[in-house]
Structures are given as C-alpha cells and as structure tokens.
Image (cartoon, rainbow, N blue to C red):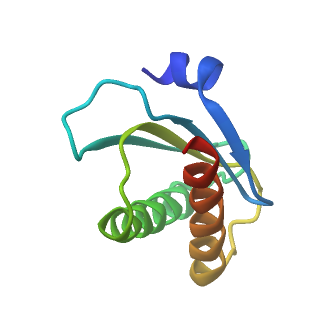
Amino acid sequence: MIRSLLQNGKKFHSSNLTVYLDKSYPVAPGRFLSSFHVSTAQIPRAVDRNRLRRWLREDLRRIARQKELTGAMIVRFKTAEAAIEHHRLTDELEAVLSAALKNEN
C-alpha cells in the first residue's frame, strides 16, 4: 500500500506536510486508511517524532468526522522543525486536505 501510494498517489503540499492521496484505494465504505511518516533524519528524538504523529492522527480523526474521507493517504512531515506548534500543523493539514478533496472531486 505505502509504495503504491508514494509512486501513484496524487501529491498535495504545504510548507511542512505532503499528503499522498488515492481515493480509489479499496476500503470499506465510509472508511479510510492513513499512514504518518516522520523521518528520523529530520527529527532525531523519538519523543518528538511520536508527538508529531499523535498530533497528526488526532487532527485527521477530527477532520474525518467533518468531511467524507475515503481511500488511502500518507501524511509526510517534511521539515526538520521539531518545535512546530500544534495549531500551525493543524491549520496546514486542514488546508492540504481541503485542497486535495476539492481537487479530487
């Protein structure tokens, strides 16, 4: 799943995130699959990487309750900025997913 999404999924970017999305990926109706990638090279401390993943998961669940998310997606954190604020990350994820869902329809 991950390799095919990285190679064939549509990419949507912000300054700190890249979202790879494939709405045609086969999942149960009303469900979606997600994966979160935070590089060890960019964020060396596991505590910081795990915090970023928790924030992204929490935000994605909240967004999924508001919007129709289907298929599969990978959310990749692409900046070496471990001290990013949660609200800034939330705003970027919402903007990227809004653009992705608008573009997919």
Q: Is residue 19 above or below residue 59?
A: above
Q: Nearer the viewer, residue 88 or 68?
A: 68
Determine the residue positioned at 62% across, 76% down.
91
Determine the residue positioned at 77% across, 55% down.
79
On-image quarter of the C terminus: top right
Q: Nearer the viewer, residue 2 or 23?
A: 23
Q: Position of residue 92 (x, y in %)?
A: 66, 68
Q: Say whether residue 79 is left or right of residue 43.
A: right
**Residue at the right extreme, as displayed:** 15
Q: Nearer the viewer, residue 89 or 11?
A: 11
Q: Is residue 84 above or below residue 61?
A: below
Residue 25 quadrant: top left
Determine the residue positioned at 69% across, 74% down.
84
Q: Is residue 33 above or below residue 66?
A: above
Q: Say whether residue 79 is left or right of residue 34.
A: right
Residue 90 quadrant: bottom right
How many discs appear? 0
On-image quarter of the N terminus: top left
Q: Position of residue 39 (x, y in %)?
A: 64, 43
Determine the residue positioned at 59% across, 27% down.
9
Q: Position of residue 51 (x, y in %)?
A: 48, 66
